[in-house]
Amino acid sequence: MTQAQQSNGGWLRERLGGGLFGGFLNRTVPDETGLPHTLGSATLFLLVVQVVTGVVLAMNYSPAPEHAYDSVSYIMTQVIFGPGLRGLHHWGSSALVILVGLHMLRVFIWGSYKVPREVTWMVGVALLLLIMAFAFTGYLLPWTQRSYWATVVGTKIVGTVPLLGNWLLQVVRGEADVGPVTLVRFYAIHVLLLPALLVPLVIFHLYLVYRHSIAPAPGNESTARKTKRFYPDQLAEDLGVSLVILLILFGLTWIWGVPTEVRADPSSTTYVPRPEWYFLFFFQLLKYFEGPFWEPVGVVLLPLAVILLLFVLPLLDRRPERRPRRRPYAMTAAGVGVVAIAGLTYLGGVQAPPGTRLAPAGSSQALVDRGHEVFVTNKCEGCHVVKGEGTDFGPELTHVGARYTADKLMALIHNPTSVNPQAGMPAFDKLSDADLKALAAYLLTLK
Amino acid sequence: MTSNAPAAGDPSGNRRTFFTRLFYGLAGLLGALVGVPVLGGVLSPAFRPAEKAQWIAVGPISRFGAEPTLAHHVHPSDEGWVNVTAEMLVWVVKTPQGEFRIFDNHCTHLGCPYHWDPSAQRFACPCHNGMFDATGKVVGGPPPRPLDYYESKVEAGTLYMGPFHRGGA
């Protein structure tokens, strides 16, 4: 090795080749590359955040129905930065779905999937499916009512496939019901299988982005165009957007944390199962497909057709024209798609799913159910034990309904020292009258 | 990078310097915002306060004499998110003064469980021939310090074991 090579940092370069990473950074991108193009790198950044926070969560998690919920509580109370890490992972998953959607929409509107970037798009569609699979399998892991029942319903959809349904359901769940085998299965898929697929696909996607460079603005392809450096100019902008997104995630974690949920109860008859918001549109869509003929159409044919269409889009739409104004059909399709997904998500959000045994509004059972919700969301179990659950900092409440009247309970909760001057419990005087009544109704059932 | 940078004073050179600094600043900030919580989470066990030792009943004092006795008992303990019942073996020796010594049953050399050899009146470790007398003192072999022990107390005829101590400490 010559002196010049050594002084030029040539030792590593000589051994590793050095050209690829340097080439990725020291390339030029079209001058008009800007804010809309930061979505891809922000997605990559969020994936890194999901991986590193996921590693710490996995270190403190037990994929067994007896322990999963408790291990998540352990993360929230005993692990340093545990609530922050879980908050980032929780909100990050939603942010990823949104970012991937926006990234895809941007690429679609600009026609960037066209020649020569067809394969980049196809790999991107595969990555979108992977992200959804991550979201679906990760959702079950906290083993809460919400996650358990969302998975029961979500996997049941697979069971409606004609002929193969029961067999597929068994494969997805690992057994007839969602249970211990399902939980370990989902855990293995979430932390072993999907990351193993994700990493090479992301690298392939990035390589293709590097190979074909960023697409210039539509209509600007043939002119001798201005360029700018990817590093540091565009990359600094990418990181700036990533920072804003990260701060938003911290903000959401700070303000709302991760919603408190009760432990999964497979014997529950009153819980209304509902998937996480990013699957609501599909959940809602299935309500319009009923009967032995239409159900398989909605469950199997339609999703498969949409996925297949997305996948082969660059092969079908081979016109090189990329200007949105000259692609009325493509723009209409994108508009319809966005409106349909947004509309179905909205409808799914406001309509209670049919076929669930939700106690009728105004009934005493509905009041008790609401009271249990109030009990959980106000973290009463942080100080009181009910049927073996919770922390015994304050008095046990397993038989509290036998000891107090509703009025006394409400007075105690609203202002504890008014009933017992020695009470150590903080006053829950921010509860609405309706919630206070519901909470008392729930506590009265504990006898 | 520096070799093809324009001469100082060139506005595009200033621009490049600005973006380079901005890039490093943002990269550092993002790394810290994500890295610090992640590192904190990984190193979390190191910051956990030591568990307060409980007094655990070992058995009625009538069971223990001058000849070391192996006491086997089970007690509940919290391991992370799991409530486990831990099984423990300790050696109990009654001193001529009537006090009780409770020894941890692992050799202070490499942690092998040892046994009492009545004929030699010694604790003998099978791994590397470590030897201790009935007071826990090293009388042969490689162990670097006397046997580890637990504090003991007697209440209402029952022997209790308390906080753990390293031998010789």
Image (tube, coloured by chain):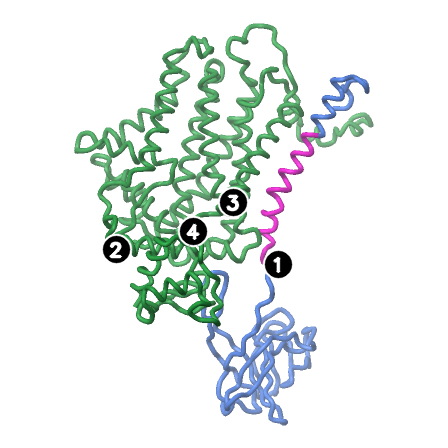
Chain colours: A green, B blue
Question: Which stretch is magenta?
Answer: B22-45
Mark toward the viewer: 4 or 2: 2
Q: Quadrant of the N terminus of chain A?
A: top right
Structural distance between the alpha carbons of marks 4 and 2? 22 Å
- Whole-percent x, y for residue A369 in the image: 30, 54
Disc marking residue A365: 2
Q: Is the magenta stretch mostly helix, strand or loop?
A: helix
- Residue A257 at x, y percent in the picture: 49, 47
Q: Where is residue A163 in the image (x, y as percent from the top left)?
A: 20, 36
Mark 1–mark 4 Cα distance, whole angstroms, equals 28 Å
Disc 2 versus disc 3: distance between alpha carbons?
33 Å
Q: Which amino acid does label 2 sit on?
A: Gln
The label number, if any, that marks residue A260 in the structure image: 4
Q: Which amino acid does the dot numbered 3 rest on?
A: Thr
Secondary structure type for disc 3: helix
Nearest to viewer (mark 2 / mark 1): 2
Crowding near pointer 2: few (<14 within 10 Å), some, many (20+)?
A: some
> Is residue B161 placed above or below A384 in the rendered structure?
below
Circle 1 SS class: helix
Please report whichever mark, 3 or 4, sits nearer to the chain's N-terminal start: 3
